Image (cartoon, rainbow, N blue to C red):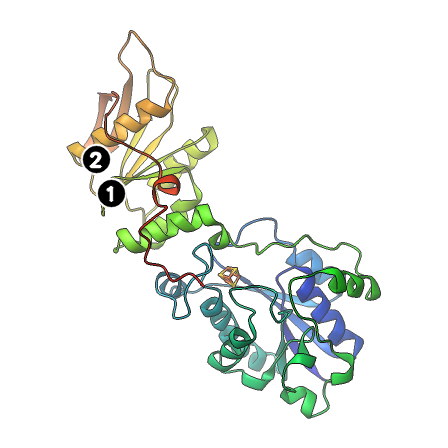
Amino acid sequence: MTRCIALLSGGLDSMLAIRIMQEQGIEVEALNFKTMFTCCQDLSAQVARDLGVNLTIIGQEDDYLDLVRNPEYGYGKGANPCVDCRIYMFERAKKFMHQVDAQFIISGEVVGQRPMSQKRSDLDTISYQSGLEDLLLRPLSAKLLPPTKPEREGLVDREKLYGVQGRSRKFLIELAHKYNLKDIPTPSTGCSLTEPEFGRKVHDLIQIQVDDQPWDYDALNVGRHFRWNENTKVILGRDHQENLKLEYMHKMEDATSSALIEPLSFKGPTALVTGPANEDSISYALGLVYRYGSTLEDEPNTVRVDAETGSQEMVAVPTDRSSDDITIAMTTGLRRQER
Ligand code: SF4
């Protein structure tokens, strides 16, 4: 029995790649790769059920953040190191392939569909650097690429593969109808690293806060972020849920936050100070809580500050320091290599 591993994102391309293999009587084991930046509704489980394939989900390991911090092949428009990330995924898929006794790996990549990771040269780089080389088959674009080992050895009929290229989805949707795929997902990377606003916050961490920790990346999903200096940031909740989330995150074992500020006498955001909590950083955070809160005119705007040194009540007052959040302020001066 011929068996292959499919990288399944839950998007149309990977669904089609699986169907093309199934049409040839090849058994498919699906693999979904999750990172701490995976976002949006994850359709992979439902898609695997619809396609009738087993699904295994694997997560990133500790070294994943190293490639986000310093990708060999650069970033896309956000902070997405897609070529490095794909290499990382396929390296793990290769191990899985050996574990389940599969002969090769397929993916839904289409030549020229994504500027960052699907240029022809990127596909070659990914195949080579992942160590898969000609064991990596892209059924949708196979006819534009040299025959892979499973094609040469007759495990896969190359005549029944395709030569799709570019960004148009027209032919892919026709194929979806041919293969009787009913729920056609809208295109999405499902990865917050590709979002420019989120990407600016990631670049801020990488370039300014060189001692960043995994917790700092998790915290990027919550609140407005304001940089005070290279070691210190203030995060403000944007609503009640985010205020609660910040409170929870402050208590986590690996938290880099040093102070939690909560309004007492007025409605306003909860603030976390990451990095050293000193007189300057706390007063900067108090100014932000004042600015974004519904402050009182004739009474003191009191807050509780829980810092490493203890808990105390303080008064939030306006600050004259400019405090645009990172997504607005970090529009220039980045050293990233956009591709
Ligand atoms: S979009 Fe995100 S998950 Fe997908 S390859 Fe790029 S960095 Fe990796």
Residue to which mark 1 is pinned: 232
Element carrying mark 2? helix
**At which x and y percent is residue 135?**
59, 84
| Mark identifier at residue 281 | 2
Disc 2 crowd rating (10 Å Cα; few below 14, some 14-19, many 20+) is many
Element carrying mark 1? loop
Q: Depth check: 250 or 159 in front?
A: 159
Number of marks in picture? 2
Q: In the visual, does 120 lie left or right of 155?
A: left
Q: Can you tell which quarter of the image residue 157 is in?
A: bottom right
**At which x and y percent is residue 110?**
64, 69
Q: Is residue 89 above or below residue 130?
A: above
| Mark identifier at residue 39 | none
Q: In the visual, does 164 lie left or right of 83?
A: right
Disc 1 crowd rating (10 Å Cα; few below 14, some 14-19, many 20+) is many
Distance between mark 1 and mark 2 Cα atoms: 7 Å
Going 61% across and 61% down the picture, which residue do you hit?
9
Among numbered discs 1 and 2, the one appearing first in the sequence: 1
Going 47% across and 67% down the picture, which residue do you hit?
85
In which quadrant is the N terminus drawn?
bottom right
In which quadrant is the C terminus drawn?
bottom left
Name the amino acid, label 1: Thr
Name the amino acid, label 2: Ser
Say if mark 1 contacts mark 2, CB within 8 Å.
yes
Tell me, yes or no, if residue 256 can be seen here.
yes
Q: In the visual, does 79 lie left or right of 175?
A: left
**At which x and y percent is residue 46?**
70, 56
**At which x and y percent is residue 115?**
54, 64
